[in-house]
Image: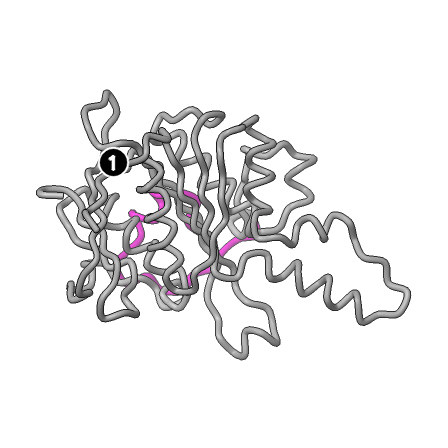
Amino acid sequence: MSALAFSVRGLGFWSPGYPDVAAWRARPDACPEGQVTSADAAPRAELLPPMMRRRTSLLTRMAAEVAAQALHDGGLDRAAATFVYGSVYGEIRTTLDLLAALLVAGEPLSPTKFHNSVHNTAAGYVSIATGNRAGNAAISAGPSTLAMGLLECAALVAAGEGDVVLVIAEEPLPEPLAAGRRWDPFAAAFALSAAGPSDMPARTCRLEHGPCDMSPGPRVIPAALAASPCAPAIALLDALAAGAAARVALEPHLAVGWQCALGAGA
């Protein structure tokens, strides 16, 4: 398969204590565990109207927040861009709440929680809030979710479908599914366009498949985020924000997998 080329025109990021890409990039390389205030513990998600926002989960609010950041950063039309959402576990907390309600005799199931439990919940809320009638998709591919999401987006761009926004979001697993595993919630977004001249700044990228033998990036990802199954999205965002030529493994758990070549020669 030939390499797929595209440009990344906008970025978005949110995690507790890091409300945007600038705050994330400004953190020390060795990031000690700090106090996160209640105001920093959830995204503002102002893309969603207040009444709609109150009904959503943390996962959906994170997705809406970073989507808005990437759209603004890239100068994309929010009503015309195609959206692809990637999450390994999706709205798993809401799903478990529904399953728990089924165990209680006579407990009614919440219609709101029911429609908030599907994997494309964020896609529905964001498309309604923005009046977006373009296509959207929600995918899950385990630790390869970033790679498959980026491949989907790059193929859409190559097929002439216009601007595409990839949103990756993951929140901690609840018990008993967590089985002691723990990671912090985060979301990242990447606004993609066709490679070529533009009046907007862009990072030229190319998707390739081959041995994942590249060195780790210069910045260490805090352990609480590195444990997330979607952590490769943070490494990619770091490399794109740095603006230098780099090669990022999108599937570092595999000996041979998808990679993203950035910058010079991409």
The structure residue drawn at horizontal position 62% and vertical position 50%, both measured from the top left corner, is: 57
Which residue position is annotated with label 1? 7
Hey, which residue is sitting farthest right in the picture? 106
When asked about the image quadrant of residue 145, the answer is bottom left
The answer to whether residue 127 is above or below residue 102 is above
Give the residue drawn at x 60%, y 61%: 92
* Amino acid type at mark 1: Ser
Percent coordinates x, y for residue 70 in the rendering: 39, 36
Q: Residue furthest bottom?
A: 179
Is residue 190 found left or right of 247 in the rendered image? right
Q: SS of the residue at dot 1?
A: strand
- State the image quarter where residue 242 is shown: top left
Where in the figure is residue 167, as x and y percent of width and height? 43, 45
Q: Position of residue 45 (x, y in %)?
A: 54, 39
Q: How many marks?
A: 1
On screen, 240 above or below 159?
Answer: below
Which residues are the magenta region? 17-38
Q: Residue at point 33% right, 55% down?
A: 147
What main secondary structure does the magenta stretch of the protein show?
A: loop
Q: Is residue 225 magenta?
A: no
**Viewer-proximal residue among 165 and 47:** 165
Looking at the image, can residue 15 be seen?
no
- On screen, 181 above or below 45? below
Identified at 18% across, 42% down, the residue is 243
